[in-house]
């Protein structure tokens, strides 16, 4: 293990490169610690967390918001947090940013530290004391400078990351070498393949050197009044591209560095041979060096950059590999970089990126086959969501809807066609289990399958509904000790119920039939109430898991409008239409409401990662579904 010290005005930080997450107890008092993490990290590493309270947030850039911060404040109050409480963020950059901001503002400041689980967070996001959230589409516009007490960089955690996530982390490592250390840059050039494969000796050196470079800069200029601005190399264009094109931070910074090096050539002494080295190294690390976007949108976002002052902007120029300088350039001087951006004909930046990826995917190899089995399936948004995700991620896959009456024949065909994966919807979630080779533990426990993985001819059943529901709910509130009424007793209700119970909520199953409702309540350890007696129920959350209110029966609702009160959160897992009659009536009563879109997207993200081994582009998937609904690709009325 190697350590690096950062001396800050708000306190000192020790960065521990090579320390284990299991050693957290050495740096905090466990009984006074509250962990903040996301649903994905909790799923993978939750069993390794120490025995302390946990706050779980959702995935994706959309959760980096004041709404999430407010939800965490509420949970901290419920947990009885006080000035002796220490917050520990376990996750990537979003978790670290949110944790630091919450810790810096709750009760005028709590102790905090991080266990950084991604390469990007280990070398950048968790180091340096910048904490903040997004607001109205602009990154990190609300934030503070405040140093964490410690940052644990457990290198073993990187092995669970998909390749694309690893590439994104390397963008910041390349940046550090480009602006401050020619030797490290050359080392990475010579060892790019070993670095990308996470060779321990190579990755330990690169993480340590990157942190050392950033720590040295922060020690000299913590509040970004001068030298620290160098760390923004590639970020002026990068942030604008990230905002408008919907790509990841690392990918956007990669493109931004290429553009910044071109601006450097136009305004300084850097030679083209150095800009070419930069571009080659980024390509060797599977990072993009160009992208098609709507240049007008990028230019608009760039002019709203935090670093702008009047008609000029502080811009980082490369003098040579290993040396950078910050100059105050006019906005027009920076405009030269715009010519290195392509402009799609349809003026839709996200779509342009998708189409660009589609060409690469279709040319690469025969697409892998996926699909959804159900009856009906004409209403399903899964094909739109997954196909957009495949193309965005440059994964050669194609996803079709299959109307299936006989599930046994569909499963046989799945093997014959060598389909990699399938979603399963009504009415087959339970009956499909008898035709699979193996069952995931949670799916077997739930007694329903909505996801199938074909692993070398062995069909394995999973259930992603539980994770999807919990992720959607924890974007808004903590489930611990909440009374959650679940309407329905089918496969979806069973999955949601287990998810609530595992997150320490209390479940009341509400159903028309006493027999099936009582059985589900007994299975998951909850209470039961007849739907006809719902007015007697006292609950904090109500979730409809039945198809009542789904297209075409959009005027139906499972719950009388007199049931709702303004202190209740109401969720409907239906997403066609997004605003069911249930949600409309709950909104009118003053309830906080959640439609079926977040759950649908999060369960789809689980499927995508299971099938491809890549990190799901959650925001791209959410956007695809939202666009389909907004533009009427699915008839909902």
Image (cartoon, rainbow, N blue to C red):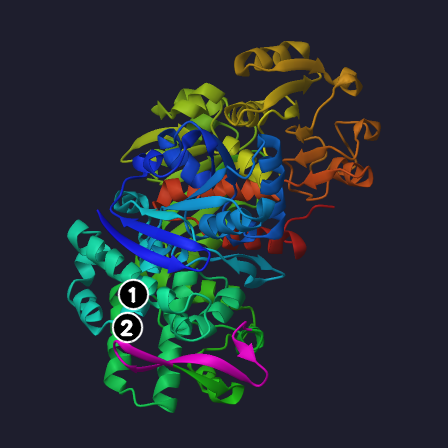
Q: Which residue corresponds to the image point at 51% horizontal and 81% vertical from the top-left?
A: 313
Q: Which residue corresponds to the image point at 49% horizontal and 42% vertical from the top-left?
A: 604
Q: Which residue corresponds to the image point at 51% horizontal and 55% vertical from the top-left?
A: 620
- Which SS class for mark 1? helix
- Which SS class for mark 2? helix
Left or right: where 318 falls relative to 306? left
Residue 225 position (above or below residue 617): below
* Closer-to-camera residue (395/373): 395
Q: How many marks?
A: 2
Mark number, residue 213: 1
Distance (Cα) linking label 1 and label 2: 7 Å
Q: Which residue is mark 2?
A: 180
Left or right: where 244 falls relative to 594? left
Q: Which residues are magenta?
A: 305-325
Residue 258 position within the rendered picture, expressed as x and y whole percent measured from the top left:
36, 76
Residue 393 position within the rendered picture, expressed as x and y whole percent measured from the top left:
40, 56
Would you call the spot at circle 1 few (<14 residues within 10 Å), some (14-19), or many (20 or more)? some
Residue 240 position within the rendered picture, expressed as x and y whole percent measured from the top left:
51, 70
For residue 270, which quarter of the picture?
A: bottom left
Residue 471 position within the rendered picture, expressed as x and y whole percent measured from the top left:
53, 38
Q: Are marks 1 and 2 in contact (CB under 8 Å)?
A: yes
Evaluate whether residue 463 shows in this view. no
Residue 324 position (above or below residue 474): below
Q: Is 310 inside the magenta-drawn segment?
A: yes
- Report the magenta stretch's main SS: strand
* Closer-to-camera residue (222/538): 222
Q: Is 407 inside the magenta-drawn segment?
A: no
Evaluate whether residue 581 shows in this view. yes
């Amino acid at each position: 293990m190697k350590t690096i010290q950062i001396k800050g005005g708000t306190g000192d930080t020790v960065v521990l490169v090579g320390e284990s997450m299991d050693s957290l107890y050495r740096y905090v008092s466990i009984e006074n610690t509250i962990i903040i993490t996301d649903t994905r990290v909790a799923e993978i590493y939750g069993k390794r967390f120490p025995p302390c309270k946990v706050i779980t947030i959702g995935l994706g850039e959309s959760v980096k918001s004041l709404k999430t911060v407010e939800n965490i404040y509420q949970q901290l109050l419920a947990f009885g947090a006080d000035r002796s409480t220490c917050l520990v963020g376990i996750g990537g950059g979003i978790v670290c940013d949110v944790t630091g901001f919450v810790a810096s503002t709750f009760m005028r400041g709590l102790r905090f530290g991080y266990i950084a689980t991604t390469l990007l967070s280990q070398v950048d996001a968790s180091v340096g004391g910048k904490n903040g959230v997004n607001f109205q589409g602009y990154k990190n516009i609300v934030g503070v400078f405040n140093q964490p007490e410690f940052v644990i960089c457990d290198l073993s955690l990187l092995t669970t990351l998909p390749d694309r996530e690893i590439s994104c982390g390397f963008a910041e490592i390349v940046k550090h070498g480009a602006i401050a250390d020619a030797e490290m840059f050359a080392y990475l050039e010579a060892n790019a393949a070993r670095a990308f494969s996470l060779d321990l000796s190579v990755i330990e050196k690169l993480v340590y050197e990157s942190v050392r470079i950033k720590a040295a800069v922060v020690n000299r200029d913590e509040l970004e009044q001068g030298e620290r601005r160098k760390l923004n190399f590639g970020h002026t264009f990068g942030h604008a591209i990230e905002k408008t094109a919907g790509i990841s931070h690392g990918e956007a910074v990669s493109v931004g560095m290429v553009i910044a090096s071109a601006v450097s050539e136009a305004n300084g002494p850097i030679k083209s041979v150095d800009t070419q080295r930069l571009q080659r190294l980024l390509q060797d690390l599977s990072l993009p060096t160009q992208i098609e976007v709507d240049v007008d949108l990028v230019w608009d976002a760039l002019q709203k950059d935090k670093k702008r002052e009047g008609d000029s902007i502080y811009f980082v120029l490369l003098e040579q590999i290993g040396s950078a300088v910050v100059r105050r350039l006019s906005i027009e001087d920076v405009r030269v970089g715009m010519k290195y951006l392509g402009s799609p004909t349809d003026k839709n930046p996200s779509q342009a990126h998708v189409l660009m990826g589609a060409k690469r995917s279709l040319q690469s190899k025969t697409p892998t086959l996926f699909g959804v089995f159900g009856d009906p399936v004409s209403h399903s948004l899964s094909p739109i969501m997954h196909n957009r995700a495949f193309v965005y991620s440059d994964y050669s896959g194609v996803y079709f809807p299959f109307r299936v009456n006989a599930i046994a024949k569909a499963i046989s065909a799945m093997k014959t066609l060598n389909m990699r994966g399938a979603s399963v919807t009504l009415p087959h979630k339970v009956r499909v289990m008898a035709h699979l080779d193996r069952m995931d533990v949670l799916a077997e426990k739930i007694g329903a399958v909505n996801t199938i993985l074909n692993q070398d001819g062995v069909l394995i059943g999973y259930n992603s509904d539980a994770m999807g529901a919990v992720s959607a709910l924890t974007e808004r509130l903590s489930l611990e000790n909440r009374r959650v009424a679940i309407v329905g007793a089918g496969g979806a209700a069973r999955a949601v119920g287990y998810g609530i119970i595992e997150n320490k909520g209390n479940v009341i199953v509400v159903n028309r039939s006493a027999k099936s409702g009582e059985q589900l309540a007994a299975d998951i350890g909850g209470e039961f109430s007849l739907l006809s007696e719902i007015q007697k129920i006292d609950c904090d959350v109500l979730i409809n898991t039945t198809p009542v209110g789904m297209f075409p029966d959009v005027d139906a609702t499972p719950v009388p409008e007199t049931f709702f009160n303004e202190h209740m959160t109401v969720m409907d897992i239906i997403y066609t239409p997004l605003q069911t009659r249930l949600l409309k009536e709950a909104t009118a009563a003053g309830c906080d409401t959640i439609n079926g879109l977040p759950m649908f997207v999060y369960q789809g993200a689980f499927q995508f990662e299971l099938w491809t081994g890549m990190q799901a582009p959650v925001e791209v998937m959410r956007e695809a579904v939202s666009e389909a609904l907004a533009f009427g690709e699915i008839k909902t009325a």
